[in-house]
Amino acid sequence: MSAHRGKVKWMDMRRFKKIAAVSLVALLFSCSLASAMIKRPPARYTVLVNSDIRHSDENFLANRLDMSFSKELTSKVTAKFSPFVEVRHNLERRKRERVSTGVELGLDFGGYFYAGEQLRQTWRSEPVYNRGIIKNTNMTEALSILKLSFPLLPKKDIKGYVCGEYTYDFRLGQGVRVESIAGMLIPFGKSWEVNADWRHRDRIHADDCDTLEAGITYIF
């Protein structure tokens, strides 16, 4: 009896998390849509290459498009809402392996600290948690982000950052990845940015990996 109650309680908790997440996204999207009718937010198109140091068969090329709605809450705190879509192609297998679309909600504290939560729907055919096992899968994921930024050079816009990310898979009902990231961001004028980072990806139920990633973003 106790085991059955525990299972029911767990299922109710998962259902509550989904309802809460969808409700929050709908509320913020409505507010952002009203704001967008007054002023179009900036859009960003990014192309990046991710090289897996340990597993060359997992190198990928990604194309990402997002828009950033923002609202100043105080002089130092800005709320952000960013819908996005991303497509990844595996460079070794020469096939599209993942398509993701969703929204990211976050708070930016003076450009130095950022806390965000991403909710996304993902469709993919790739090694899922166990390398070498290819599955056609669709899932809903939540990604929690904590990011600390700091200037690398005085009187320059070049920034360094360290970041932690945690991915939760609603389909499995458990966390699946923890990533530790260190990188730098270099702006070129008002329309271009170059980003480079190293990241350690801890797949909670499979192989870990280390990657080098570089990308260029056009802001329009």
Image (tube, rainbow, N blue to C red):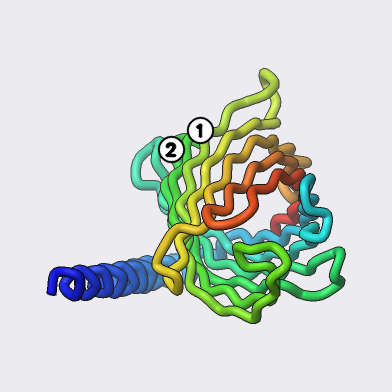
Label 1 sits on residue: 112
Instruction: Name the quarter where the C terminus is drawn.
Output: bottom right
Residue 27's image quarter? Answer: bottom left
Residue at the top extreme? Answer: 154
Residue 151 visible? The answer is: yes
**Residue drawn where x is 73% and y is 43% of the image:** 195
Q: Give the left or right position of residue 24, taking residue 115 as reference.
A: left
Residues marked 2 and 1 touching at CB (< 8 Å): yes
112 left or right, relative to 10: right
Q: Secondary structure at mark 1?
A: loop
x and y, in percent, of residue 86 in the image? 66, 68
> Whole-percent x and y of residue 215?
77, 50
Q: Is residue 133 shown left or right of residue 41? A: right
Work out which quarter of the rendered image holds the N terminus and state it: bottom left
Give residue 102's position: percent from left, percent from top.
52, 70
Choose between 207 and 159: the one closer to the eye.
207
Which residue position is annotated with label 2? 109
Q: Quadrant of residue 173?
A: bottom left
Amino acid found under the numbered disc labelled 1: Tyr
Q: Is residue 189 left or right of residue 154?
A: right
Q: CA distance from mark 2 to mark 1?
A: 6 Å
Q: Please name the amino acid that badge 2 sits on.
A: Phe
109 versus 125 height, above or below: above
